[in-house]
Image (cartoon, rainbow, N blue to C red):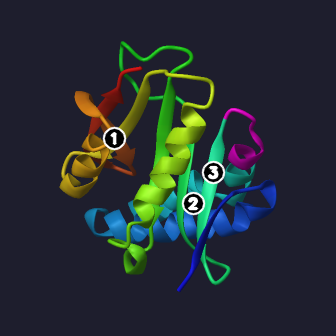
Amino acid sequence: MATTLRRGTVDDAQTLSLLAARTFSETFGHLYRPEDLSAFLAESYAVERQRLILAHPDYAVWLLERDGVAIGHAAAGPCGLPHREASAGDGELKRLYLLREAQGSGEGGRMMDAAMEWLLRDGPRTLWVGVWSQNFGAQRFYSRYGFEKVGEYLFPVGEARDLEFILRRLA
């Protein structure tokens, strides 16, 4: 089945909200108490929040679609990770998720390439990504793009605090 990758618009806020909640739940939902997961999804992936991200000129979101149905998404923007060496002008891969059924298809690389091209559109700069400490596949994936671990922080989901690794790729 053919897929298309396109830049998201504010009209995609509802689709992005549903897709982001579903992909996060598929990937990490088993780690959290139901009430913590529900509260996190409601806040982090609210339609209005997605609309703001999609409308913001400093952010970009891509939707991967198969036969017109969204199956993956990636988002990039200014670095917001808590690292002492992160500075204004640095970029960050904020999200890169595929539905479970689409994982292993090579489409993650396609979305990553689009995000990297956008992040580096004005020339080389330092790039960042946060990844769960136990997501070894994602860590290997990002290392293929030149990212290396440079720090850690705790990512809150309700009462849970996940150990996240901060990865960086120097300009």
Give the residue pinned by disc 2.
42
**Residue type, numbered disc 3:** Val
Residue at horizontal 60%, vertical 73%? 65
Question: Label 2 to label 3, Cα distance in Å?
Answer: 19 Å
Residue at horizontal 56%, vertical 18%? 89
Chain part drawn in magenta = 52-58
Q: Position of residue 71 (x, y in %)?
A: 53, 73
Q: Is 165 rendered above or below residue 52?
A: above
**Residue type, numbered disc 1:** Tyr
Give the residue pinned by disc 3.
61
**Residue type, numbered disc 2:** Ala
Give the secondary structure at mark 1.
Answer: loop
- Of the residues tagged 2 and 3, which is closer to the observer? 3
Camera sees residue 133: yes
Residue 160 covered by magenta stretch? no
Horizontally, is 108 left or right of 119 in the view?
Answer: left
Within 10 Å of disc 2 (Cα), the crowding (few <14, some 14-19, many 20+) is few
Going from N to C along the chain, the mark reached first, 1 or 2, is: 2
